[in-house]
Image (cartoon, rainbow, N blue to C red):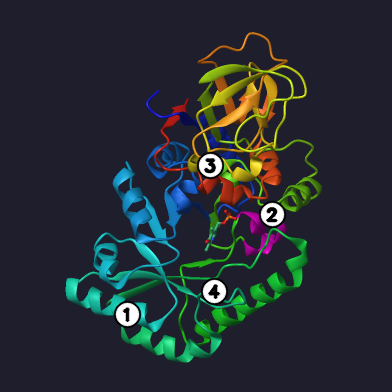
C-alpha cells in the first residue's frame, strides 16, 4: 500500500442504483450522470468505466478540465455536458469534440458562434434560463433577442437544450420557491416556442427533484448524489418511501474508504492522548494509530467524535485529528494487530459507518464530505 488509505468502488452497487433510478424515469427521459467534483470524490477515471458498464452514456460536469478527463477515459461513445464554467480559450476544444455546454451569457453565446464559424462545426449548446436560483442563467426579458440570434445563426449553433437548476429541491421549506421556478421555466419555454424555437431537450431535475417534483422529469435528468447510493436529504428518502410505499432503502453506497492500523500503544490512566488536553485516559487504555488525517479529507471536526471499524467493531476517535493521523480507542477490541484493516466509511461484517452518520457528526453534507476526499488516494473497483 503506497498510500496510507484507499477507496473501494462497488460496481454492483452502482449497477443497482442506476437500475433503480431508471425505474423512476419515463422511458423518454434520458439519464445524465453528474460527475463534477471528481465524480463526487469517487474519482473520475475510476468511476467512468464502471458507470459505462452500468449503462450510462451521458455525463455532466461543471468545468472543462473535468470534461477533458471524462473524454479521455470514455471507452464508448457518450455525451459530455458542461453545466458551468467554460473559459473562452477552451471553447474551441469543446466544439471540435462535440462537447455540449450551458450558455448563460452573450459573451459565451457569441464566442461559440464565432468559433463554430471558424472551424466549420456547430456548437451544441443548452440555454440556461434564470428561474430563481440567481446564480447563472438568461433572464426572461432576453428571449426575443436570443430568438433572433438563434434564428440568424442556425448554421453554426445547435441549441439542443433549454434548462435551469432548482434552488434546493431536497428541502420541503423551499417548496414554494421551487414551484415558482418550475412555472417560470415553462413560461420561458413557451415564449421561445411562440418565436418558433423548440428544443430537443428540456431539463430541470437533479436527484431530489425526480422524487419530490416528478413533473420535472422531462427529456433529461441530471442525477448526481443518488447514483452514488446516497439521498440528497432525509426528507427526500422519506418522500420516496411514502410515495412508493417502500420499506427498505433501494440505494446502495458505492464508496468505501479503508486504511490500516499503523501503530498500537498502551496509555496509562490519567495521561492525555494527542495534542493538548482534549482527551484524558480514564483507565489504562490501548490506542491505535491510523495514518489518515485532515489532509486526507478526514474532517478535524471529528476530533473525539468520529467512529471507525476494526475487526467488525466500532471504535472511537480519541483526541484531535492530526494532519496525517488519528488515534482510536481499541481497549475493548481483542486481537487488534498492526496492519489490520480499518474502515473509515463502509462496512465490516454487519457493522457500518455511513457517510450520513459521519457527515452529521462533522456538520458536513454528504456532498462536501465526499468531494473533500483527495484525488491522490488510490481507487479500486470491487466487482
Ligand atoms: C450538481 C448538479 C446537479 C446534480 O445534483 P444532485 O443533487 O447531486 O443530483 C444537477 N444539475 C446541476 C446544474 C448541478 O450543478
Q: Which residue is mark 2?
A: 211
Q: Nearer the viewer, residue 271 or 383?
A: 271
118 or 36, nearer to the observer:
36
Q: Does the magenta segment cover residue 213?
A: yes
Q: Secondary structure at mark 4?
A: loop
Residues tagged 1 and 2 counted as in contact (Cβ below 8 A): no
For discs 2 and 3, the disc positioned in front in the rendered view: 3
Magenta stretch: dominant SS?
helix
- Disc 3 secondary structure class: helix
Dot 2 or dot 3, earlier in sequence: 2
Q: Is residue 316 left or right of residue 67?
A: right
For the residues labelled 3 and 1, say whether their Cβ atoms are less than 8 Å apart: no
SS label for mark 1: loop
At label 1, counting other C-alpha atoms closer than 10 Å, the crowd grade (few under 14, some 14-19, many 20 or more) is few
Span highlighted in magenta in the image: 207-216
Label 2, secondary structure: give it: helix
Q: Which residue matches tag 4? A: 135
How far apart, in angstroms, are the residues tagged by discs 3 and 4?
Answer: 31 Å
Q: Which residue is mark 3?
A: 294
Amino acid at each position: 500500500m503506497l498510500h496510507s488509505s484507499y477507496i473501494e468502488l462497488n460496481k454492483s452497487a452502482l449497477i443497482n442504483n442506476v437500475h433503480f433510478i431508471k425505474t423512476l424515469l419515463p422511458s423518454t427521459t434520458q439519464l445524465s450522470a453528474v460527475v463534477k467534483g471528481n465524480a463526487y470524490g469517487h474519482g473520475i477515471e475510476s468511476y467512468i468505466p464502471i458507470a459505462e458498464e452500468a449503462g450510462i452514456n451521458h455525463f455532466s460536469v461543471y468545468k472543462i478540465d473535468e470534461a477533458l478527463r471524462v473524454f479521455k477515459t470514455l471507452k464508448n461513445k457518450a455525451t459530455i455536458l458542461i453545466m458551468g464554467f467554460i473559459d473562452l480559450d477552451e471553447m474551441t476544444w469543446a466544439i471540435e469534440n462535440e462537447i455540449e455546454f450551458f450558455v448563460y451569457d452573450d459573451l459565451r453565446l457569441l464566442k461559440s458562434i464565432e468559433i463554430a464559424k471558424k472551424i466549420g462545426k456547430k456548437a451544441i449548446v443548452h440555454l440556461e434560463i434564470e428561474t430563481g436560483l440567481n446564480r447563472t442563467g438568461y433572464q426572461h426579458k432576453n428571449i426575443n433577442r436570443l430568438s433572433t440570434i438563434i434564428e440568424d445563426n442556425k448554421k453554426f449553433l445547435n441549441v439542443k437544450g433549454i434548462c435551469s437548476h432548482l434552488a434546493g429541491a431536497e428541502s420541503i421549506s423551499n417548496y414554494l420557491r421551487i414551484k415558482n421556478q418550475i412555472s417560470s421555466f415553462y413560461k420561458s419555454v413557451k415564449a421561445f416556442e411562440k418565436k418558433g424555437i423548440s428544443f430537443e431537450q428540456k431539463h430541470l431535475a437533479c436527484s431530489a427533484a425526480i422524487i419530490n417534483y416528478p413533473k420535472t422529469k422531462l427529456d433529461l435528468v441530471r442525477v448526481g448524489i443518488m447514483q452514488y447510493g446516497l439521498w440528497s436529504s432525509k426528507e427526500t428518502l422519506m418522500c420516496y418511501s411514502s410515495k412508493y410505499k417502500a420499506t427498505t432503502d433501494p440505494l446502495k453506497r458505492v464508496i468505501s474508504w479503508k486504511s490500516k492500523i499503523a501503530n498500537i500503544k498502551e496509555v496509562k490512566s490519567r495521561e492525555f492522548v494527542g495534542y493538548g488536553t482534549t482527551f484524558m485516559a480514564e483507565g489504562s487504555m490501548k490506542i491505535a494509530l491510523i495514518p489518515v488525517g485532515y489532509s486526507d479529507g478526514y474532517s478535524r471536526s471529528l476530533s473525539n467524535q468520529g467512529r471507525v471499524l476494526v475487526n467488525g467493531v466500532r471504535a472511537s476517535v480519541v483526541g484531535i485529528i492530526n494532519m496525517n493521523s488519528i488515534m482510536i480507542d481499541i481497549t475493548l477490541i481483542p486481537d487488534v494487530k498492526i496492519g489490520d484493516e480499518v474502515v473509515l466509511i463502509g462496512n465490516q461484517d454487519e457493522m457500518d459507518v455511513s457517510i450520513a452518520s459521519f457527515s452529521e457528526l462533522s456538520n458536513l453534507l454528504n456532498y462536501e464530505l465526499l468531494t473533500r476526499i483527495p484525488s491522490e488516494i488510490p481507487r479500486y473497483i470491487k466487482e
